[in-house]
Amino acid sequence: MNFFLKKLLIVIPTLYISWTVVFITLNIIPGDPVNLMLGGRPASDEVRENVRHNLGLDKPVVERYFSFLINATKGDLGKSYLTRQPVTTMIKENMMPTIQLSIGGLIFGVFFGVLLGITAGAKPNSWGDTFAMIVALCGISLPSFWIGMLLIFIFGTTLGWVPIVGDGFTALILPSVTVGLFFAGGMARLTRSSLIDVLNQDYIRTARSKGTSKFKIIFKHAFRNAMIPPVTLLGIQFGLLITGAVITEEVFARPGLGQLLLQAILSKDIPLVQALIVYMTAVYIFLNLVVDFTYGLIDPRIRLERKAT
Amino acid sequence: MHGLKIFIKRFILNKGSAFGGIFLILIILGAILAPVIVPYHWNAVDSGPRLSGPSLDNFFGTDIHGRDVFSRIIYGARYSLTVGLISVLFGITSGSIFGISIAYIGGKVDIIGSRIIDVMFGFPSFLLSLLVVAIIGVGLWNVVFAVGLASIPHFARIIRSAALQIKEEPYIEACVSMGFGKIRIMFNHILPNIIPIIIVVATMDLGGAIISIASLSFLGLGAQPPQPEWGAMLSSGREYMRYAPWTMIYPGLFLFLTVMSVNLLGDRLSQALDARQSMGRGKN
């Protein structure tokens, strides 16, 4: 079967199974959602039944499960317990800032990660390598909420170079760095080891013996092959963007999906938690699919090999 | 014993692991001896003037309640390291049992088990931790459990593939032909051979677990004030960042250095073991 089609077909059951997991886990939460809706006010049995009926909680679990799956497929994920708004509207309203932040973090992370990785991998055990790897180690060891606060304190409050609130481009710089640092660290380490592997291969030695310049060897001959493992890593690392969104939005007091999720968890707004997790896993699975396609494109061996088997 | 010599050379006599090791030993000693070392009790509100800067009386200044930040950080080391370790131990134990079992039993069990791992992988692990906290509620131990649980698929996947390799070794076949029970083969014969891998992946994950737990505490889902957990300290220090940056800088610095030390040890451990393995088997 076609490599791309096969990948696409695996996504659908994965999505449904993950939605099932979300539905089951959020339905075993102790505590009656009706109490939550009433905000702890005493109420007659009649009122409680009414609320229960409005929330659709009087139906059997199996029926609710199937209507959840069908509605989720249609894009309807229910209404928030607290605001009574459709959760999809709430997600749409908060989506843009998170997308901007993720793209900013991704660009920063990939750019500096690859730059550090190439600096290190081009000349292993040199000063440049040591320096780049110390920076990468710091990248993966820095707690993002701490580095976010330090950046606000240094560049926002003390030096006043960039605004720390607002929605302009400059206000996006510090949050992007915060999200991207961990990314950059992982990227740098993998790019380094992958580049070292590639540079030890025969075809590179051939190129070198023909007198090709070091720059040309790295960027023309080695780069594409060396980038396959880091691109694969990118897929797994998308999860970090979600982590980054939750923490960075909190630190920088930015609106977004991360903030929405955190508030939903703290207030036990189950439909909203459910919808956000369904939405985020769908995006995560979709982005991983894009990554699979990308390395199928970078490396024809992958799609041909799978085709052969 | 040649391998062991290389291991010692690569691991113990290395600048990186030396730095990480020394810092961690200091932190562990600090955590154990906290009541002896620190000048004030972690919750003593009269340790100095409120929000006063670092001085000889209060090395790292004081917080909004006049509590000594240095004393709180040293006490806080008790939390960060233990909760990280417990969460990783929980994750790796469950992951190993699961991974070894499905790999050894094989067949349909392996296929279904691997599918379960794949589906769990469909969730980003931090989201999985958040989901678990949403179910079981807020609190430090709930967060430790959530982070450990979210790490199981990752561990199970690595341990499964390691166990699959060992399963093919002739000595396992010998065990089977001698009629040993499944449990005995799995835990007396396969497990000891993948212990090095288990130690490496657990160490490599410890830093991440410490950060995740601190992050959840920072978000208000884990340790609650007045507990001197570093993430929770940063969360309250954040409000006074402008006037009293020390309440935010020092707890984060300790968290960072601890995680970096653990990561350094994990890196060097895995490099040293790789070297030992490639030496033992002869290169290529």
Image: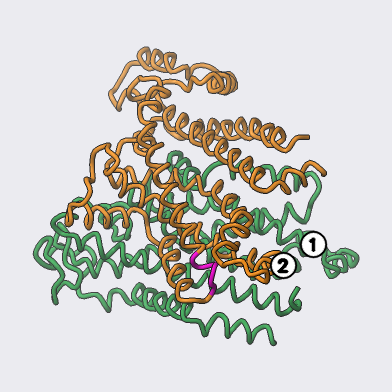
Chain colours: A orange, B green
Q: Chain of mark 1?
A: B
Query: What kind of element bears circle 2?
Result: helix
Q: Which image quadrant for residue B194? A: bottom right
> Looking at the magenta stretch, what is its main secondary structure?
helix
Which of A55 and B237 lies nearest the eye of the viewer? B237
Rendered position, A51 above or below B278: above
Left or right? Give the position of A202 relative to B70: right
Q: Chain of mark 2?
A: A
**Could you tell me if residue B283 is visible in this image?**
yes
Q: Could you confirm whether marks 2 and 1 are on the same chain? A: no
Q: Quadrant of the C terminus of chain B?
A: bottom right
Q: Residue at x 76, y 68 (%)?
A: B189
Disc 1 marks a residue whose amino acid type is: Lys
**Residue A121 is one of the magenta-drawn residues:** yes
Relative image position of residue B59 (x, y in whole percent) = 19, 73
Q: Residue at x 21, y 61 (%)?
A: B247
Q: Which residue is mark 1?
A: B167
